[in-house]
Amino acid sequence: MGPLDGEVILVTGGTGLVGKAVQEIIAQDPPKGETWVFIGSKDADLTSYEETKALFERVKPTQIIHLAAFVGGLFANMKYKVEFWRKNILMQDNIMVLSKEYGVKKLVSCLSTCIFPDKTTYPIDETMIHLGPPHSSNEGYAYAKRLVDVQNRMYNEQYGCNFTSVVPTNIFGKHDNFNLDQGHVVPNLIHKCYIAQRDGTPFTAWGSGKPLRQFIYNLDLARLMIWVLREYKEADPIILSVGEEDEVPISDVVHMIADSMGFMGEIIFDKTKADGQYKKTASNLKLRAYLPDFKFTPMATAIRETTAWFKENYDTARK
Ligand code: NDP
């Protein structure tokens, strides 16, 4: 690929859950005068400064949505703290220093609610990220991601760079990782329900089903991230989430999945398995102050679309 003309928006992590959703939203109504470039790890290993620089030289991005990250479940986070720290730090440092060198006009990176202090009050908001240590199980990932926010402010202050970050809650949707051991709760349950229906066995969810969570559909998140790229001017992060009133118990999610798959068998909540934190409520008041009328896709609709996609793409889905 040679250098591109006009506005060039580079999306790192373009092959992932969020990246694919951004791709789908952009494809629905391709913006004029813009070229969107979606890349995965095969296009450039962003932990390597040389490969990242070669990518910038090839693409000459004018704006960036940086989604690429080294992510994983609890077990991996506990076992590979150094890798979670180092790979994420290297990626974000390379992206930032090169964004500054190449005069990138806007850089949006991605934090997560799981990097917030372990001991905190609820609801959490954007001002609380650094107010205490994260849970020790994911401290490598959490401290690396927290530094995105610190780096954004330093680049802004010293070089006037327009770098910012968003904080999504639990994301799900098409193109998720449906792995039964490593996947997040929604894709994990969808895969389990699929197997239960296929094999005529009970659909067993782990835990009591009582914990509450806020979920965001990847297509809604993609729309909001594109808005952040275009309209949001602060260096400080913004939580992208449904409201506190839309927190749902896991048991509701289980029933929505069963309904959407037409699963008529037995549903079991295995209470011998840990529930995890009862709730981790995040406030979306900052988002609502900017976008009071944004309509989130109803959870049941989003679940229906995701389960339909998983059934249709069972052979090729990440699992
Ligand atoms: P995925 O796991 O679906 O995708 C990760 C992406 O990162 C892939 O495109 C992968 O490329 C790319 N990547 C990984 N390592 C490298 C590397 N060394 N060089 C270049 N690219 C790399 O992630 P999500 O879409 O779920 O996450 C997007 C962002 O959202 C991340 O920053 C994550 O921390 C954040 N987030 C996610 C949440 C969730 O619930 N999923 C919750 C909150 C925040 P490839 O596939 O080609 O290897």
Image (cartoon, helix red, strand yellow):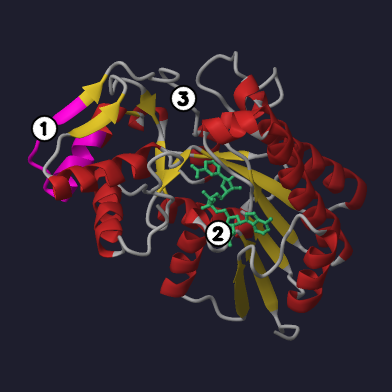
Q: Which-is-in-front pick, marks 2 and 1?
A: 1
Up/down of 304 relative to 83, above or below: below
Q: Identify the residue position indicated by label 1 in the image.
A: 266
> Is residue 239 part of the magenta span, yes or no?
no
At label 2, counting other C-alpha atoms closer than 10 Å, the crowd grade (few under 14, some 14-19, many 20 or more) is some
Direction left: furthest residue: 264
Label 3 vs label 1: CA separation? 30 Å
Q: Which amino acid type corresponds to the residue marked 3 in the rendered image?
A: Thr
Name the element at disc 3.
Answer: loop
Queried on whether the Cβ of the residue with tag 3 lies below 8 angstroms from ligand 1, the answer reads no
Q: Which residues are magenta?
A: 254-268
Name the element at disc 2.
Answer: helix
Q: Which-is-in-front pick, marks 2 and 3?
A: 3
Q: Which amino acid type corresponds to the residue marked 2 in the rendered image?
A: Ile
Tag of residue 281: 3
Q: Is there a contact, CB below 8 Å, between mark 2 and mark 3?
A: no
Up/down of 36 relative to 284, above or below: below
How far from the left and from the top, in percent, is residue 66? 66, 55
